[in-house]
Image (tube, coloured by chain):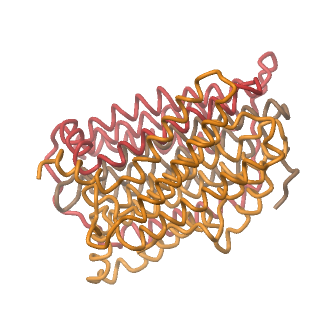
Amino acid sequence: MSAEAVVFYLFAVITVGSAIVVTFARSLIYSAFALLFTFFGVAALYVMLGADFLAATQLLVYVGGILVLLLFGVMLTHKLYDLELRSEVHQFVPGLVASAGVFGVLTVHVLYKARWAVGSGKVLAPTTSGIGAEFMGRFLLPFEAASILLLVALIGAAMIVRRRKDA
Amino acid sequence: MTPLQKACDSAARFQPELLLGAALLLVVVVDSIRARWRDAVNFTLTAAALVAAGVLALQTRPEQYRTIWDGMVTLDSVAVFFKVLLIGASLLVLLMFRRSRELSGLVMSEFYALLLAVTLSNILLATANDIAMLYLALEMVSVTSYVMVAYMKGDKLSNEASLKYILFGAVSTGVMLYGLTLLYGLTGTTSIPGIRDVLASGLPDESRVALYVIALLIFAGFGFKTASYPSTSGARTCTRARPRPSRRSCPSLRRRPASR
Amino acid sequence: MITIHHYLTVSAALFALGTMGALTRRNAVNVLMGVELILNSANINLVAFSRFASRPNLDGQLFAVFVIVIAAAEVAVALAIVLTLYRLKRTPNLDEAKALRG
């Protein structure tokens, strides 16, 4: 097996294994830390796919932002002196059947059979300047619209959580 | 044309939306001033911005119909129709909010900002020409409506409804996004006319099941957001939330993103 | 030789696990973790298709950046609502939120 294959399988096992822990762990903290490893695994897969800017963004935003937020959410919604962070699961078997069915259909019928619009693949090169050029070119409007989304989320989240009734 | 010239040309044809965006920012700034006339000024500002945006949208002439922002947004008769429809709906909601008893104790300025934001997002959703813009606009509408539905935070029922709405909505748009990525993989392009061309020119037989699955995933997501059968429970949950006028932002059969 | 199908299988596994988590979990924060898995799986799809595309383009990666941005905004608002629910009811369990059935 080539070195590329070894590295790929290593990170794929890390990613999917941690995702299994996220989904099936009994304790919330185990899920949160397994999610950390999942995000790291995904960032490693991005690097293998040549998306260097995206891997860095994934680490900064997902691990540094979203995961920290989720940990705050976990910690703030339980009594701290009583660290019983259990989380239960209901309707386990129907959910398992449904998602196993989805995975089965996807792998057997869709992913390996369809003729994806792929070619030999592009040469791996740093992507940051290309992404920056696209942000100012074709993707200018989504870039600006995303800033409005973030403004609304900021106003909204702060407004929902604050305690006083008036501003 | 250089990218700057293209951007300026697109901005000149984007006046209603730019006006709504500027009004949104102005409402937020006025909201930061501690004065008693804050709510009244914001109300008139929002109403004036909506009316002006509607008038500007109606002034689009047929020879200006084209795709702007480098293929991200279209401008044609359907787009103008939906712009006017959405602005009109938001004006109605604005007037209803003014008379709502449930909201009489709360600060309203942020609500006006959210109303402008949801109008702008709905217009972007109706005129989107690219699946990246489509997904972004759909999420803008969703996140803004999550916030609007959660506005009355003291009420338990409203809070529970908003939590259910946001969790359902997040899962369904996640599923839709997965379908959109498979569609991008199948066609190699993110622009909707490009996808239409690739699909119209025929796909090989092996890709047929993939296309069915993709369609299923995308419609599962969209179905929740527009409360189409069989996902009507979203509308039922959301309409239990107060304040009642914000039910307009719930998924409903009336609010349909323009499809091509 | 790592082809695109390897990456697609990884993302399909993440998608299945994410929907499983989002559908069966009782705690709201766990459901959000499932949603994050779904969004990550879509991102892997996008980047993989962009890398192996027949004509070289960065569209997939740019779309993925926007998905990351949207995920961050969504989690912020969702956690704000979860915190408010916890303040009112002292539990983040979704089963306790049963005043609205259906």
Which one is nearer the viewer's eye here, A104 or A40? A40
B8 to the left or right of A46 = left
Q: What color does chain B have in the rendering?
A: orange
Say if A128 sits above or below A116 in the image: above
Which one is nearer the viewer's eye here, B119 or A55? B119
Task: Please provide percent x and percent y for residue B133.
Answer: 39, 55
Task: Please provide percent x and percent y for residue A51.
Answer: 27, 41
Task: Please provide percent x and percent y for residue A65.
Answer: 50, 28
Task: Please provide percent x and percent y for residue A53.
Answer: 28, 35
C94 to the left or right of A31 = right
Residue A43 visible:
yes
Residue C95 visible:
no
Say if B131 sits above or below A142 in the image: below
- Residue extending farthest to the top is A81
- Residue extending farthest to the left is B1
- Residue extending farthest to the right is C99
Q: What color does chain A have in the rendering?
A: red
Total residue callouts: 0
Which residue is painted at 49% across and 48% down in the image? C39
Q: Quadrant of the C terminus of chain A?
A: top right
Which one is nearer the viewer's eye here, C48 or A16? C48
Q: Quadrant of residue B80?
A: bottom left
Q: What color does chain C have in the rendering?
A: brown
Say if A110 sits above or below B117 in the image: below
